[in-house]
Image (cartoon, rainbow, N blue to C red):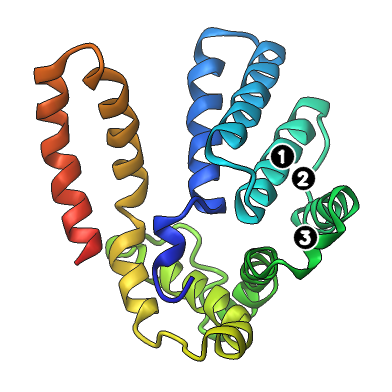
Amino acid sequence: FCGTMHLATLSGYNITILVLAVAAVFGYFFSRRITFYATGIIIFLFVLMVGAEASVLRAAIMGFLALLAKELGRLYSIRNAVALTAAIMIFTNPNTLFDIGFSLSFLSLLGIVYLEPAFKKLFRMDNQTNKKDFLSWRENGITTLSAQLAVAPLLIQNFGQFSLTSIVANILILEFVPLTMFLGFLLAGTGLVFHYLGFLIALPVNILLQYEVY
């Protein structure tokens, strides 16, 4: 979890991209009700496929709560969603409370929820919602700083290290993660049916992955 490890693992960011993509595809062809149930089933199957680790389960539950709020026409409160998700996970498995992955996942999210608005106000970014920077470096930098500061004490205590360069690395990587995930899913689907087409898709995927690893 130091630096950019959260990008290599299945985190809330990856699950969010998956949920938005699936909901957009189903929403184009089906009604809102069918889209809700279909997306919920996809989330459930995806969690079963990759393993219900703390970060994946947390992101999946919160993603489902967001879908449920939209379906019921209610406002989605991320603070309430965080509290309810933590309560559900601890109630179903009390040992989760002592899982380092559980702590890191929720601390990083709480850092984004509570520290990010403060940093935006400090750096006078709260009124620049329509301003787009190269690689969204301001937005991604503040988000990464908020998350990293929130987990820093736990990282230092458990692993004895904290990456000071992670903020810059995340800024350079984050904008390419959605495209990498999209091409990766496209490669997995087409590669099984059309071998040569899969090879062509693999070329840009390899370039993106090489860049992100570097």
Q: Secondary structure at mark 2?
A: loop
Residue 115 rendering spot, x and y as whole percentages: 64, 77
Q: Which residue is painted at 30% across and 42% down in the image?
A: 179
Q: Which mark is residue 76?
A: 2
Residue 53 rendering spot, x and y as whole percentages: 62, 51
Residue 93 rendering spot, x and y as whole percentages: 84, 52
Circle 1 Cα neighbour tier, 10 Å, few/some/many (<14 / 14–19 / ≥20): some
Q: Which residue is painted at 61% across and 90% down in the image?
A: 157
Q: Quadrant of the C terminus?
A: bottom left
Residue 66 rendering spot, x and y as whole percentages: 71, 39
- Among numbered discs 1 and 3, the one appearing first in the sequence: 1
- Among numbered discs 3 and 2, the one appearing first in the sequence: 2
Q: Secondary structure at mark 1?
A: helix
Q: Which mark is residue 190?
A: none
Q: State left or right for residue 91 relative to residue 46.
A: right
From the image, state whether disc 3 or disc 2 is nearer to you: 3
Q: Amino acid at mark 2?
A: Tyr
Rendered view: 12 above or below 15: below
Which residue is disc 1 drawn over? 66
Q: State left or right for residue 135 relative to residue 76.
A: left
